[in-house]
């Protein structure tokens, strides 16, 4: 994409032309084009047209700047686009010079055209409407040359804006209640409910029952500074910890009864056999040695019994895998969303810093009696300011209330949320692997067909990309 800036020249046309046609800036004059005049005689050519007009305003010429995003366009293509913009805007009526500067990190065109046309000697009318016309022509050219164009309907930074708006409105309470409802439906116990809520990025306190515990359970969304109580006044009767536990227990009672759990061992297992995999006794060495096979059978029995005793039953083990899978999927979904928000906000901060650093040059430029002379001294700072302003406006940022410290604080909060979600996701994934190994051992030992699909047991391994 490209952005534009225009101002009138009231005094030094010759100095402005000399500046934009400098050999050091235009590849020894190769990237210069003109129409109705030549760079060497432009000031005199403009003076002739101006002498024919009856309008008395002091404007002798206009200086239009067209700047491109770094790395998006070559020097030659930028010059061609600048010439096309001048032709479409001025329609063959006004004399102009187009030069492309290559001495900065950002490629940009300078277009200086006479304030009076060569046909009827009417002066160019510079106003808000004419500037919007320049912007429309500029966007059309960008599309034709396959350059990026950010339209208002597809603003970048939208994900961060939605996050920020949600943070400062009452809708976050509705989302909290919806998340609690989803966790209640998926949980088989109050402890599992807490785990599912934490997987969504919430911080919880006051979840304990009994003497000495807090009266209310409280939830803190990752994008807020304060906790909200699970009380009748704040969220409603259904969202107190007593009612949440009651809702879970009632739902569990309505489900079909589970099979009777395998009785727990009276003596604790000395070794953690549940972390091991069954020994494959079909190998030839076990077939040739009855003693070795007997030892392997005993070891396999210990491994299966250890997994069974820790799980309580195969049904409970399958339920644990389902719960952990749900927690992992929820955490991963929240993590992806948070990373998008961080990326958008990081770009906003970059342009906000650029805008703030160069704002003073724009203010002085606006107050300058000779804007073109000031532009020649501070071209880079003014282009950086205008580019940042253009991007921030297209992102929907209110420049009057731009608060860089708040943006950085929001970024820190999002990054903290990302780290929490990463920990939750990795922990759930690790537990899924452990539970799946136990279930595989039991299914293999008992000759039982697996009831949990592989796609449900194992979450897609995307930890490297997270």
Image (tube, rainbow, N blue to C red):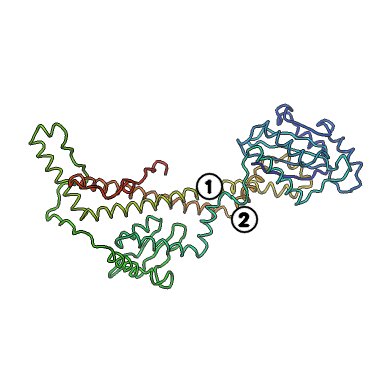
Q: Earlier in the sequence, mark 1 or mark 2?
A: 1
Image-based side of 462 in relation to 411, left or right? left
**Badge 2 density bin: few <14, some 14–19, many ≥20, Cα 10 Å:** few
Give coordinates of residue 442: x percent, y percent: 20, 47
- Residue 398 tag number: 2
**Badge 1 density bin: few <14, some 14–19, many ≥20, Cα 10 Å:** some
Q: How many marks?
A: 2
Give coordinates of residue 344: x percent, y percent: 53, 48
Confirm or deny contact between disc 1 and disc 2 (CB under 8 A): no
Can residue 382 be seen at all in this image of the molecule?
no
Can residue 40 be seen at all in this image of the molecule?
yes
In terms of secondary structure, where does tag 1 sit?
Answer: helix
Judging depth in this view, the residue of 149 and 254 nearest the camera is 254
Check the picture and name the quadrant holding the N terminus: top right
Give coordinates of residue 424: x percent, y percent: 36, 51
Q: Residue at x 33, y 60 (%)?
A: 193
Give coordinates of residue 90: x percent, y percent: 79, 41
Seen in the picture, residue 463 relative to 287 is either above or below; the reply is below
For label 1, the residue is: 346
Most extreme residue toward the front, as rendered? Answer: 449
Q: Residue at x 85, y 41 (%)?
A: 117
Q: Residue at x 40, y 63 (%)?
A: 219
């Amino acid at each position: 994409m490209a952005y534009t800036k225009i101002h009138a020249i009231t005094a030094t046309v010759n100095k402005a032309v000399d500046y934009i046609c400098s050999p050091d800036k235009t590849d020894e004059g190769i990237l210069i084009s003109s129409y109705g005049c030549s760079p060497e005689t432009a000031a005199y050519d403009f003076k002739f047209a101006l002498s024919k007009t009856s309008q008395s305003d002091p404007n002798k010429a206009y200086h239009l700047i067209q700047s491109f995003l770094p790395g998006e366009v070559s020097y030659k293509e930028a010059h061609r686009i600048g010439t096309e913009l001048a032709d479409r805007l001025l329609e063959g009526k006004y004399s102009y010079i187009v030069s492309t500067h290559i001495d900065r990190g950002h490629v940009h065109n300078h277009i200086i055209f006479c304030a009076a046309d060569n046909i009827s000697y009417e002066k160019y009318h510079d106003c808000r409407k004419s500037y919007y016309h320049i912007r429309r022509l500029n966007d059309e050219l960008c599309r034709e040359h396959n350059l990026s164009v950010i339209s208002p309907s597809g603003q970048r930074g939208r994900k961060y804006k939605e996050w920020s708006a949600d943070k400062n409105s009452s809708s976050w309470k509705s989302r909290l209640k919806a998340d609690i409802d989803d966790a209640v439906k998926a949980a088989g116990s109050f402890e599992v409910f807490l785990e599912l809520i934490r997987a969504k990025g919430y911080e919880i306190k006051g979840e304990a029952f009994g003497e000495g515990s807090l009266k209310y359970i409280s939830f803190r969304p990752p994008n807020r500074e304060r906790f909200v109580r699970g009380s009748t006044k704040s969220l409603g009767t259904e969202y107190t910890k007593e009612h949440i536990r009651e809702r879970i227990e009632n739902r569990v009672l309505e489900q079909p009864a589970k099979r009777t759990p395998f009785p727990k061992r009276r003596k604790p297992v000395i070794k953690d056999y549940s972390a091991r995999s069954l020994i494959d006794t079909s190998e030839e060495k076990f077939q040739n040695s009855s003693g070795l096979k007997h030892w392997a059978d005993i070891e396999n029995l210990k491994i299966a019994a250890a997994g069974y005793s820790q799980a309580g039953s195969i049904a409970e083990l399958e339920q644990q895998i389902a719960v952990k899978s749900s927690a992992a999927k929820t955490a991963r979904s929240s993590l992806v969303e948070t990373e998008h928000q961080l990326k958008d906000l990081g770009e906003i901060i970059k342009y906000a810093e650029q805008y703030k650093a160069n704002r003073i040059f724009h203010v002085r430029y606006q107050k300058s009696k000779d804007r073109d002379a000031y532009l020649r001294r501070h071209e880079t700072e003014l282009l950086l300011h205008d580019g940042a302003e253009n991007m921030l406006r297209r992102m929907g940022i209110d420049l009057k209330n731009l608060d860089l410290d708040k943006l950085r604080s929001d970024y820190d909060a999002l990054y903290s949320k990302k780290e929490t979600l990463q920990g939750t996701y990795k922990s759930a994934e690790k537990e899924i692997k452990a539970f799946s190994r136990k279930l595989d051992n039991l299914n293999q030992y008992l000759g039982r067909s697996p009831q949990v699909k592989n796609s449900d047991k194992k979450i897609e391994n995307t930890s490297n990309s997270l």
